[in-house]
């Protein structure tokens, strides 16, 4: 692999995708303020791949080696062909996961999924209070989610709860974990908000304080010790509060492949924000080409693309320079070090972001919820000032 | 807890064990994760089927690999490891 030859060659592609994420639609009945989906998602909602298109994607990715399948969105249940897709995935030998808000999960559909061989369902939850859950999703879905959780459990599915953490719910982690235990969750993922897409737009409104993050981790650790193996609790550390970046997607084009609603093939969820990139699309290219040969997938493989301080950094293998999207979104340089790293010249921008999140005036700005109307406003450049405030972008 | 020869295990609920052609190895799949198994781990777990006892697994593998001495200890250690990881569970 590229990392083993001193970064001389970044184009060694003897690896295989292990995970395929099918972002099957960007339509969603929820309007979550922290959604990582692209803010211009309305540009990608009118040309969704059809069932046949997805079946081709599943077959090609499986042939390349993918075996974990996430069926995600948007809200995947807005499509009526998930049953067919689940069946196909099962017959191909995928371990398949439906990632859902729960909206649209009826008794009839869950039975069909079970019969079709869906392996698990990951349900998003938001808070223990109806008020905050409804507020942050901008919907009335709290009670429905409780009902869906019971339905998942009842069908013998492993219950995987995903809770995105932000400053509106971070102080309720103890209660959230208690709720998860009561619901019989097998896995709970406390995913601290990462700032891309809508969550970046709402960063000042969502980011907790350092003290809150430390406390949340402490509470989580204590709960994990108590509950033991019965419920696995993952705490995804928010990288803004650390001083080294995450090894984003476990490395660009290393194990993850995402196919978007309109057929773009991406190495990570938000790669389309990067400048001067042309991503392959399954309507024109097969996935073998996309993974092995496309310039986009090869661009940030290995470390030959790195600049200083990453290039000679003794820790570069640990994080591969962090996240390309974050580097670009914050510093304007997609090849630079992820500004989360305290060796990055962009680090002061992260320090400022953490400070800004405590700034009362900025915090008071209204949240921009993920709606078609707001997406159109972003496309029209109406939220430009807000983003310019904390970006180095021109 | 020591494994008895009469103990019977199966692949744990919500886990799947399968051969992967593209990776050329056995894997264990579970929610949010997967593990690629090395050759000997794969051979052991292949026999974990909810009806073959630990003792029978040892006998079968001894017959299959007669040239490898002292494999009983390694097999039981592998089973113990898999139990610790919650990949397999006891049925009897």
Image (cartoon, helix red, strand yellow):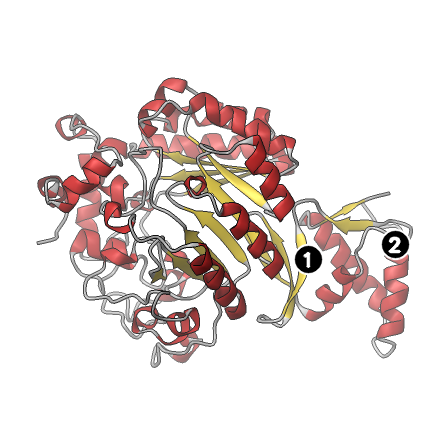
| Nearer to me, A1 or A142 | A142
In the rendered image, is residue A188 in sight? yes
Q: Is residue B48 above or below residue A28?
A: below
Residue visible at 86% across and 52% down in the picture: B51
Where, quadrant-wise, is the N terminus of chain A in this rendering?
Answer: bottom left
Residue A171 percent across, percent down from the top left: 38, 25
**Distance between mark 1 and mark 2 Cα atoms:** 18 Å
- Give the residue pinned by disc 1: B17
Chain letter behind tag 1: B
B44 left or right, relative to A95: right
Residue A228 position by quadrant: top right
Residue A237 percent across, percent down from the top left: 40, 43
Q: Is residue A262 above or below residue A183?
A: below
Q: Name the secondary structure under disc 2.
A: loop
Chain letter behind tag 2: B
| Nearer to me, A242 or A30 | A30
- Give the residue pinned by disc 2: B53
Residue A350 percent across, percent down from the top left: 22, 46
Crowding at mark 1 (Cα within 10 Å: few <14, some 14-19, many 20+):
many
Q: Name the secondary structure under disc 1.
A: strand
| Nearer to me, A60 or A128 | A60
Q: Are marks 1 and 2 on the same chain?
A: yes
Where, quadrant-wise, is the C terminus of chain A in this rendering?
Answer: bottom left
Q: Is residue A43 above or below residue A319?
A: above
Residue visible at 58% across and 70% down in the picture: B23
Residue A36 position by quadrant: top left
Residue visible at 48% across and 27% down in the picture: A145
Residue visible at 8% across and 41% down in the picture: A385
Residue A204 position by quadrant: top left
Labels 1 and 2 touching (C-beta < 8 A): no
């Amino acid at each position: 692999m590229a990392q083993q030859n001193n970064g001389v060659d970044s184009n060694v592609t003897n690896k295989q995708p292990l995970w395929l994420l099918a972002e099957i639609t960007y339509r969603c009945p929820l309007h979550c303020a922290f959604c990582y989906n692209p803010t211009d998602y309305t540009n990608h909602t009118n040309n969704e791949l059809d069932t046949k298109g997805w079946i081709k994607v599943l077959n090609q990715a499986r042939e390349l080696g993918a075996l974990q399948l996430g069926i995600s969105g948007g809200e995947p249940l807005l499509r009526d062909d998930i049953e067919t897709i689940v069946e196909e995935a099962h017959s191909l030998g995928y371990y398949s996961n439906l990632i859902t808000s729960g909206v649209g999960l009826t008794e009839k559909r869950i039975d069909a999924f079970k019969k079709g061989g869906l392996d698990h369902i990951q349900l998003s939850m938001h808070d223990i209070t109806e008020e905050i859950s409804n507020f942050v999703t901008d919907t009335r879905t709290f009670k429905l989610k409780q009902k869906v959780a019971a339905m998942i459990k009842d069908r013998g599915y492993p219950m995987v709860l995903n809770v995105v953490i932000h400053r509106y719910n971070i102080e309720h982690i103890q209660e959230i974990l208690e709720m998860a235990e009561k619901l019989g969750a097998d896995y709970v993922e406390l995913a601290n908000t990462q700032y891309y897409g809508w969550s970046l737009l709402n960063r000042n409104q969502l980011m907790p304080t350092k003290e809150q993050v430390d406390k949340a981790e402490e509470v989580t650790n204590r709960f994990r010790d108590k509950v033991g193996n019965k419920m696995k609790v993952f705490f995804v550390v928010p990288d803004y509060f650390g001083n080294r970046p995450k090894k984003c997607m476990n490395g660009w084009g290393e194990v993850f492949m995402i196919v978007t609603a309109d057929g773009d093939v991406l190495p990570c969820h938000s790669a389309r924000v990067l400048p001067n990139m042309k991503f392959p699309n399954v309507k024109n290219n097969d996935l073998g080409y996309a993974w092995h040969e496309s310039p986009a997938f090869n661009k940030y493989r290995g470390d030959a693309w790195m600049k200083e301080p990453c290039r000679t950094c003794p820790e570069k293998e640990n994080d591969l320079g962090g996240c390309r999207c974050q580097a670009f979104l914050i510093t304007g340089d997609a090849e630079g070090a992820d500004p989360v790293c305290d060796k990055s010249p962009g680090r002061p921008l992260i320090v400022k972001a953490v400070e800004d999140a405590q700034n009362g005036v900025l915090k008071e700005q209204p949240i921009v919820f993920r709606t078609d109307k707001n997406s159109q406003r972003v496309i029209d450049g109406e939220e430009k000032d807000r983003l310019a405030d904390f970006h180095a972008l021109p | 807890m020591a494994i008895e020869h009469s103990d019977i295990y199966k692949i744990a609920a919500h886990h799947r064990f399968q051969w992967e052609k593209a990776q050329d190895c056995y894997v264990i799949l579970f929610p949010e994760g997967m593990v690629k198994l090395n050759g000997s781990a794969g051979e052991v777990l292949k026999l974990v089927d909810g009806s073959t006892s630990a003792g029978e697994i040892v006998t079968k593998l001894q017959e299959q690999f007669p040239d490898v001495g002292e494999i009983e200890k390694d097999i039981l250690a592998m089973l113990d490891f898999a139990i610790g990881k919650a990949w397999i569970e006891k049925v009897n």
